[in-house]
Amino acid sequence: MNGVAIAIGCSFLDRARLLAQAADYPPALTGLRGNYPAAVEPFEALQRGAYRQFPALDTDTHEEYDLVIVGGGISGLAAAYFWQKALGATEKILILDNHDDFGGHAKRNEFQYNGRTFIGYGGTQSIATPYPYSYTAKRLIEELGIQVERNGEFAARDAFQKLDLGPAMFFDKEHFGEDRLVAGNGRLPWPEFFAKAPLSEAARKDLIRLYGKNPDYMPGLSVEQKTAKLASISYQDYLLNFAKMRPEALPFFLGQGGRNNKRVDTTPALEAARRGSVGFNGLGLTFEEEFRESSYTFHFPDGSASIARLLVNRLIPSAMPGKQTMETIVQAPLTYARLDDPKSAVRIRLQSAAVRLEHDGAPEKSRSVRVAYVRGGKVHGVRGRHCILACYNGLIPSIVPDLPARQKEALAYPVKVPMMYNNVLIRRWTAFQKLGASTINAPGMYHTNTGLDPGTTIGGYRGVTTPEEPIIVRMVRNPNKPGMPRREQNRIGQQELLSMSFHQFEVEIRRQLGRMLGAGGFDPAADIVGITVNRWPYGYAYTYDTLGDPDVPPEERPHVIGRQRFGRITIANADAGAAAFTNQAIDEAQRAVQELFVHEGLT
Ligand SMILES: Cc1cc2nc3c(=O)[nH]c(=O)nc-3n(C[C@H](O)[C@H](O)[C@H](O)COP(=O)(O)OP(=O)(O)OC[C@H]3O[C@@H](n4cnc5c(N)ncnc54)[C@H](O)[C@@H]3O)c2cc1C
């Protein structure tokens, strides 16, 4: 039932009760989530220019706030926290968000099955230290009571080690001639692994060569010349034209790439080399050790939704009473109906898409900003003495058309990265056990990465440890269009996600799990008990690279020009940092708050 995980093992009455509860409690909703259709519907009219003139209000709420924040993600919530901390708990703050849940990318997914709750993450996975968190971001995490260094106490991943499960690759018949799952990539010696894979002799030879000790594929060039050349070509170019890999081996690399979902054709070869990708170890280049995304330090079962929930606990205690800690937050009940309580100084108004902001008078002299937002198909109005746009920066030119032309052009430059984190509850994972796999990389398939998510045992919530238990399987897709420039690929991927129905996604999920796990006895019809599709056409913030973006001084980067204060409006969100992590969402919130303080002389 639209992905509902309660069809099996529940009576009709139980089912009706659980569905009704889910409506009041968005994390329990399954089916099409993430940037779900109703949430992004107002963006169409917005981008068409329907609100170029400030719209007539259907309802003037006559509400006035010290601060109106657009966007209830980590950045918007952190901005409210910093503001309140500096100016006091009586400051009136309104946070508007177009979704039915707060947190932005940091979203929680829940499934109920056979009387047990399974918690997963719909977006942000982890607090990814040792990535360089700023003092501000570290301090906020500490103030929320999260001790990242305690991660080892809670992680449930040793369940896989005990069963000797590890990475596997699925070779599909469309790209490799037959469907075959081969476990052991990265664990077996590579010649042994490739011997088991359905590859032509020539492709196998090439891959064994690349995964071994390489000769210098750029002879005659100095280190500086090599570095410059690698920065100007893609990893794919390097493999084909310098390492002379045969094109028939390329499908093996289709699911691999650089940071922020860049692929083999959009990853600069220099970035691939820095990440330790194969083919470069004979070039004589040395790099400083880089942050690796997988080296996360702290993971809640709902990912960073727990950060968002802790922020809400501090901002609106009536919605989640008692001072919650890192151990209690996962199970702490939250009353969504109290998020927008007139008695609370801070209010979060969900399902409310801001469509137009306008100063009362000239921006530098005005005393307030009018804000129009769409809720339930009607235009509502509020006023803020200050405003922070912690929403997608690419939409800001449509929301504030009075911005200077250069700023609007800069804000429109980046294209957010389309992504999908799909969560599938299965009734047991014995098929994974039989196949020896805990994660599967499938370079040619719809979802390139699939993995078991055992959760975290923390504060009374129990992660999954045995293959007979139900578990969440997380399937990742990054839609793209190889061969095009990266921003164009992002645009096409975004359209793909926006145009597909839940049913179409469900078919892809069932078909792929059936093909990859069939040999282990997996039966999609019997084994899948719930599906939540988290589609993020507006995913990661755009980041620059040496292939797709002009090499300009840092202060001339589009995100810097785009995030300038405009009268009483400042701009936050990870987009404003051109970096796609939680810490930047926090840093940009702090900057946006500071800019208003400095402008107004408030502190
Ligand atoms: C699938 C996925 C996995 C990730 N994993 C990690 C990870 O493991 N670690 C990590 O550090 N980072 C991760 N990130 C990145 C991280 O989640 C983001 O950088 C961070 O959460 C961004 O927060 P934000 O508040 O800036 O933006 P968002 O989370 O996008 O929040 C902005 C909010 O504003 C709302 N909004 C937009 N327009 C309007 C409007 N007109 N009116 C009202 N509201 C509006 C949006 O709907 C959204 O709710 C991940 C991101 C994704 C998508």
Image (cartoon, rainbow, N blue to C red):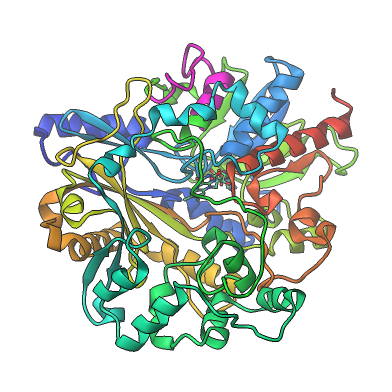
Between residues 93 and 251, which one lies in front from this camera angle? 251
Image: 412 above or below 387: below
- Tell me where residue 12 sits by quadrant: top left
Quadrant assignment for the C terminus: top right
Where, by quadrant of the figure, is residue 73 drawn? top right
Residue name at image x 78 percent, y 54 percent: 560
Q: Is residue 360 above or below residue 86?
A: below
The residues colored magenta run 308-330
Identify which residue, 419 or 50, lies in the foreground.
419
Residue 338 covered by magenta stretch: no
Residue 65 visible in rendering: no
Please tell me whether residue 311 belongs to the stretch shown in magenta: yes
Classify residue 373 as left or right of residue 600: left
**Residue 173, relative to residue 323: is it above or below?**
below
Residue at 78% x, 69% y: name it. 551
Residue at 54%, 66% (x, y): give it.
262
Task: Report x, y in % for residue 559.
Answer: 74, 56
Instruction: List x then y, in percent, for residue 545.
Output: 67, 66
Residue 128 visible in the current orientation: yes
Q: Residue at x 56, y 75 (%)?
A: 235
Residue 448 in percent (x, y) is at 37, 64
Q: Is residue 370 above or below residue 212?
A: above
Magenta: main secondary structure:
loop
For residue 172, what is the image quadrant?
Answer: bottom left
Asked whether, in this view, residue 174 is left or right of residue 397, the answer is: left
- Left/right placement of residue 207 relative to residue 540 reads left
Q: Position of residue 397 (x, y in %)?
A: 71, 56
Q: Total label count?
A: 0
